[in-house]
Structure formats: structure tokens, C-alpha cells
Amino acid sequence: MAQSDLPRVSFEKFTLPNGLQVILHVDRKLPVVHVNHWFHVGSKVERPGRTGFAHLFEHLMFEGSKHAPEGYFKYIEQAGGNLREGGVNGTTSNDRTNYFATVPSGNLEYVLWLESDRVATLADALTPENFENQREVVRNERRQTTENQPYGRWYELVNEHLYPAGHPYSWPVIGRHEDLEAAGVDEVAEFFRTYYTPNNLSLVIAGDFDEDVARDRVAHYYGALETGPLLERQRRWVPALAEGKIVEVTDRVPQARVHMIWPAPQRFEVEETALDAAAAVLGDGLSSRLEKLLVYDRRLCTEVSVFNFAREISGLFGVIATVRPDCDVREVEDLVNGQIARLASGGPTRDEVERARTVWEYQYVSSLERIGGFGGKADRLNESNTYKNDPGYFHVEHDRFRSLTGSKIAEAVKRWLVSRHGLTLRYFPDTLPKAVVGVAGAGAAAEQAEGAASTQAEGNGPAQAAPDGVLDRSVVPALGSDTPFQTPEVHEDRLDNGLEVLVVEHHDLPKVAVSLNVKSGGVHDPPDRCGMSQLMLQTMDKGTRGYGALDLDEALSRLGTVIGKTMYLESARIGMDVLTDKLSAAMALFADVARNPLFPEEELERERHRHLDHLKQQASHPQSLAQRLCPGLVFGEDHPYGRPVQGYASSVAEMSRYEIARAFEENWRPDQSALVFVGDISRDQAMKLADQRFGSWSVDVRPAKEVPDPSPDRRSNRVYLVDRPGAPQTVVCQFIEAPSRDTPDYHALRLVDAIWGGGFQSRLNQNLREEKGYTYGVSTSLGLLGVSGYWKVQTSIQADKTGEVVQELMSEMAGLGGERPVGEEELEEARTGRIRGYAQRFESLRRIAGSIGALWSSERPMTDIRDAVENLQSVSLEEVRSTARKYLDARRAGYLLVGDGSSIETQLADRGLPVPEALDPEAQPASRAPASAEVPEAADPDAL
């Protein structure tokens, strides 16, 4: 694609007298508007002993303000902001804190009122109770994301040991427990008054709105905010190590892993782009230098990733290699260093440069699909404005990438990775309950380099008094009427061989999403070959009639795409996103993978070993382990729904190439498949491509395989335990059988799920997070399958609250099932949130293609897309209540607990709850197993 053909983002920028910078970008693709705030404050403004303030305050910003006292989500969800659709959230980094919300176009003024009220009044509305609650939520977030998962502390350790003491990046964004406990309400309020000011804020409004109205309403709601102090900004501070440094960690991890990290340029620095390309050459795809050498040729590693992560004052370049058992970490390090030296001395090939550039073009165009969310157009505009005072500066970055040469890449690699010392962080497996960290090398303390550790004053002019007149923020603007939304039309066609072709035309960007969906999933695996479909899918692109594994990967990367593969219980999917001008060539490769895999013996063995390593990793990750085990506890391992799609180590080790090839021939058929196109393609073009690449696909006609009904004598109403001694959290799952997807209660179930645990305002989240602070979050998932289904709650909670949370889950299920039925206001809030957030599902081509494929695979009509809003509106309060009563019976629910066994057993016993049945990570009885673990059939869960 020519540089002039790449789409660019238009915008208008203006500044209010109080220093607030405002960027407007109009995009009328959907009837939604996105409001995106970037405050130029992150963890780097903190100090040792008081870390975690910026992130803690991000949480507090959702607790409610003076005129929206019931919590931010209560109000934003009424306006159509939807957390599950990715339309509302907030994040904190070292350098900035952002908040964003996407709502129907008619609610722009309401959101500007709500957001500006947070900035104007939150410090005054902050209560000790809210502060203490969110502090506990943040501490549980730290336990969940950092302390209770394998390798969870790697990033924190890298920053701690790479940067000198006192460097703003040397402490974790999330903070440390002791610092969070020491923080007081007054300190946090002062933090707010210093940094949450209009002259420290960049505001982007993007989407379908009237620019004149937006300018007027921004001035109305934000113009009265008083300018804050001029702030000192930390200048560029890239550390330099006097010599290499090695840190070794012993922790509960399944495999050794090495992290090789170098200091790198700051965000938007010229050489950042060259190092981005170097990362792609070294680690992007099977044919990249390090993955080919370490994973494919030498088989020393299960996986390798390479990244260049630039921040405002300094960056990181890193290689992360997960080392296979019985392989030498130091050999891997030597090989990595050798490849980096080779790239610095000889540079990349012309083909490698062109492949990196083509992948970048694809990624750039993809980032323009969404106006909001993480990494959408609003984020790009705000990032450029916050760091460079120019919303369009990212276009300069893109121009640099287009002009990259091999010599520029080689020079950057030599300067940053060869001529400088780095940090090596080694993880080794052990059974210790806590990490042990030791400095194995004698690396000197990091020193300041290429940029003083000094600060500069920054602001948007002298302080301005608030405009004349006082804004009455208690006047709440009315919510707008819902803008009519025209869902995309799905064109349905069929080839002569039975292959269905589903097309949605979407010509905003030069890109197409393609997927092939096949009604063949893990349920078709023989009982003693569990995981065969998964291994088959993983190996399909590792050798075809037209290409070997490496050749195929290179050919795809030249087109800027990859083929993604996902195996489900009842279906499989392969898909790719590609720029329009590369679609025809990419379809030839796509069809070759879909129709002509050879499953070469050597490639199969590579994938088998990688898959076995991944199963070990999954067993060490408590959240993943719980997700894997729950279906078997609902349906029993004798039923196809109860066996994990990924399989067991014992079954994966036994299956042969002949069995896998035969399974492909039997189950992958055109008459059981649908080819989906979404994007810059016409219906006729799609049909022509489909016929060209799949029209000759034929197999022997066989009857579709049927799944038996689950056995009625299963006993899922038990408590199960997987012991993780010393775990700081317990993963708690509550599960119960649900109906099949053809149930007449389909739409009512979706609303009950939203009320129970399907949103921020749901009963479970309000109870366990917002009221008690025991968890970072809780959610429900409703899996409606062909002949049955299951409903699951999953959360990670602080370990000493396990017994109480189990009892709370029992009580909440019993309440929703009848004791505390759904109220009318509760239902309308859930319904309104789903309806007003519905349009956000259609921002991404891949997501539209995924929704179409999921509907087709589950044998739902395509009209569900068109009729979704009407279907939700048609459900009555009595239908919702009766559906909850019908399926949510606390006496039939089961529980899976993954955590410290001794502590859990004691807590359950203290509350009169059942002794749990101990399981190992493969769902087999463990040595702790007691004689009985059945949940008593008590009508009152509180009596348990």
C-alpha cells in the first residue's frame, strides 16, 4: 500500500482559558460518541514509601462524585456506557491516567456533566469508607495479577533492578501493600487537587456528534474548573548499567524462563521505530530469527517473545524465553545474544524489513477501526497530545516507519542492545510458597545516561480564575433519546458443495476480516483421545500441500497477516484480518491451511511437546486451571462436555498422526462449515473468492455426529478443592447446570446473567467488590450448548475470606432464585445498559465476524443481530423472575476452590460448610480427599 493511501485521522484542537486542551474528531460510522480523558499523571510522580497513589486514585474516580453519589457506573450505564463491551474503563501507567466512555450520540452532554463533576467535586465527596474499600480492592488486584500467578512479579522485578533507586520507574504502578496501607484520605485528596486539574488534562471527543454543540458544552461544564499549579515534568532519564546484571528468582512456576532486558529510547524518540522493527525481525512469527532458532530448530524453548516498550522518559527492549525442561537457560541466553549481535553487524534482509513494514501497515489500519476503547483513535490522539502537545504526532511516527532501512535498524540494535549492558532475570521452578529473589551477578547500580534526571516546569499558561458566574452542577442534563441503529446486513449464500458464505460489507477502511467456522469441536474427540481436535488445529498450519511450516509463516507475514486458530467444545474457527489489496493472495494461503494440512510427523511432534508444556503452564495458573476444570465438574468426565478441549497430558501424549489426519478428514467438511467475510469487500467479490478457493472442496457425505444428553445422575452439588499451599488468594467458582441454547428462556437468561454477575452494577460485583472489597472483580458466564449448558461464577478473593465468600455466593444465588427476586428498576437498568451498549459491538471487523460465526455455529438465526434490541425489550419482569427461579437453585450448585487447602478447610468448617473433595490439576482425586463433600440440601443457605 502506498504511503499516500494510508488513512489519516483528522481533528480539531482548541484550549480553554483554564488550560484544558480539547481535541475533536468526527466519525459517523456508528451512532455513538466517545469521551476520552488523559490526565498527565502516573506512578512516576510518586515517591518511595507512598507508591500506588495514581492507580488507587483511578479506582476512587469510579466511587461517585458530589452530584453522582451512587457511584460512577450507576450513572454511566444509564447513559449506555458498557464495561463488558469495552466501552467504559480507566487505566494507570507510569506516565498518565486515562478514563473513557462510549455512549449513544444523544448522551454526550450527560457524559460531559458526569465526567466534569468528577474532576470538580470528587475530592470533596471522598469518604473514608470508599477510600478503605478501594484500597482493599487494589490490594486484591495486586494479589490476583502479580502475586498469585506464575512469573507474576517479573515486570516489577525488572523495573526494580534495572533502574537506580529513586528513578520514577523503579517502583510498581500498582504500589506495594505497605505503602497502600500507610496512605491516608487527606494525602490522596491532596494528590487529586494537585494533578486532576484542567491544565493537566487532555480531552478527546470522537464519534458521531455536532462540533459546535461539543465546543459549547465543553466550555459550559469544564470552563468553570480552576487552573491548577504549574507542574514539574521529569525529563528523559534512560539508565545505563556499568556492567551486566543477573537476578535469579525461585518461585512456583512450571518451567524456567529468562527475561533479557535493555534500557531503550523514550516514547516517540526517532530510534524507537527502528527498535520496533528489530523486535519484529527477532521475534514476530515462527520464521523470525529467535523463534525459528530457539523454538523450531533447536527446540530449547516453548515460546519466545520480543518487545520494545517505550514510555515517556525511558523505554525497555526485552526478550522473554520460556525454556523447555532439561534445557539450559544459559545456552538460550548465549544464542539470544548471538542473534542480536548478528542483527547489529549484518542488519536485517530486505525481505525482513519489508515484512516488518507490511505488518506495521496492517496494525496501523487496524488501530483506526475503533474510535474508543484501548488503543483506538481517541487514545492515539490523546497520547500524542499528552506527550508531544500535538494530537497528530503519531502520523510523524508512521512516516518514520515507512522510511525505515536495514541500516537504521542495525545501527539502533548496535547502539542500544550491543553497546550497552542489560539485565537478565531468571525464573527457576520450585515448590516454595513464596518467591526468593537473589542478585547472582555483581552488576553495578544503574547510572544516569543521555538525559539529566532533572525536571522542567510545564503548564498551559498562567493560572486562570474560574469564569464569571457559578455553574450549578446539581442540574442533571436529560438523557437523549436512543439514536436508531441500523445493524449491518448479513448476506447469506451457499456454494454447491454446501459451504455457507456470510458477508457483511463495511467499506470504511481498506481491510477485511475472514473466518472459516466448522461444526467440529472437542466434543468429537474419542474419550481416550481428549485434546485431539486441539492438537490437530494447532498443527494445521505447520505444513500443507503447498507450503512447509516456515515458508507458510514467511508468506503470511509478507502479506501482513497471521492465521488465528480457536477450538471450542462444539466448533472450530480459523481466521485472519488482512488489508484489502492483499486479500486475494492471502486467501490462497488461508484455503491451503483449511483444506490441505499434511500433519507432518516432525511438525506434529514439535506441537505435541509445546502443547504438553502449555498444559503444565495452565495447571500452574489458578484462574486458567479453574476454567479448565469446571465443565468436568458440571457434566462429568464421561460426557463430551465434561472433557477439556485442550486435553490431558496422558491423552495428548498417546494420539498418533494417523488418528489426527483421520479426524480432520471426517470432521472438516464444507457442508458443516461457513466462510465469513466482513469489511471492504462486496457480496459478489466474496462469492467469487469463496468459489475460487473452496468451490472444489468435497468430502464423503457422513451424518453429523450427535452429542448425547448428559446423564441425570451426576452430582455437581459438591465442594471441590485444588490445593495451592501458601496462595495469597483463592479462586472461587460456583457452577450449576443450565439449559441448551434452543431454550425459550434464551433472552430472559441473558438479562438474569447481567443482573447476577454480568456487569459492574451486578449484584455479585456490588457485594464482593464494592461493599466488601474482597476481590478485584467477579463475573458470571453463561454457556448454552447444543444439548445442555452451564452457568458459572468466577472470582479471585483474598485467601482469608474464602469461607465467607462461599456463603455469600450461596446466599446471592438463593436470593436471585426467589428470596430477593429481581426488581423492576433493577431489570430496566440491566436492559437499558445492554441496549444502549449494543452498537459498540460493531466497531471492529473481527468482532463482527466473530459474532456471525458464533451465531452460525450455535445454530441461531442471523436475524438475532437485527432483532437483539427488540428481543431484550420483549422480556417481562415476570419472565425474568421465573427464569431465575427455574435455574438458580442454590441446593444444586457446586463449588471449586483453588487455593491454600489447610486455610480453606478450616474456614469452611468454622462456618459449617462441607469438607471439600480434593482434586489434582487433572481433576483426579488427590490425597487430601475426604469421605464426603456433598452440599447439604438446605433451603436457607445461611444455615449452612
Image: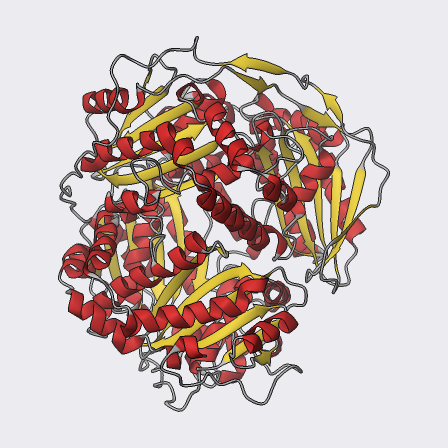
Residue at screen point 64% across, 81% down: 926
Placement of the C terminus among the 4 image quadrants: bottom left
Against 403, is 245 above or below? Answer: below
Image point (33%, 22%), residue name = 23
922 left or right, relative to 112: right
At which x and y percent is residue 514? 34, 52
Q: How many marks?
A: 0
Residue nearest the observer in this picture, 419 or 596: 419
Q: Is residue 860 visible?
A: no
Residue 636 shows in this picture: yes
Q: Which residue is rendered at x = 50% and y = 59% of the image?
A: 541
- Which image quarter: residue 583? top left
Q: Is residue 733 above or below residue 264?
A: below
Horizontal arrangement in the rendering, residue 525 relative to residue 676 (left or right): right
Name the spot of residue 927 as percent of width and height, x first: 67, 83
Residue nearest the viewer, comparing 566 with 481: 481
- Residue at the top extreme? 462
Q: Nearer the viewer, residue 394 or 388?
A: 388
Relative height, residue 293 to residue 61 (above, below): below
Residue 454 picture quarter? top right
x and y, in percent, of residue 446 in the image: 77, 29
At horizontal 64% and vertical 57% (from top left) the residue drawn is: 150
Vertical order, 856 against 482 (above or below) = below
Q: Position of residue 20 (x, y in %)?
A: 37, 19
| Residue 24: quarter of image | top left
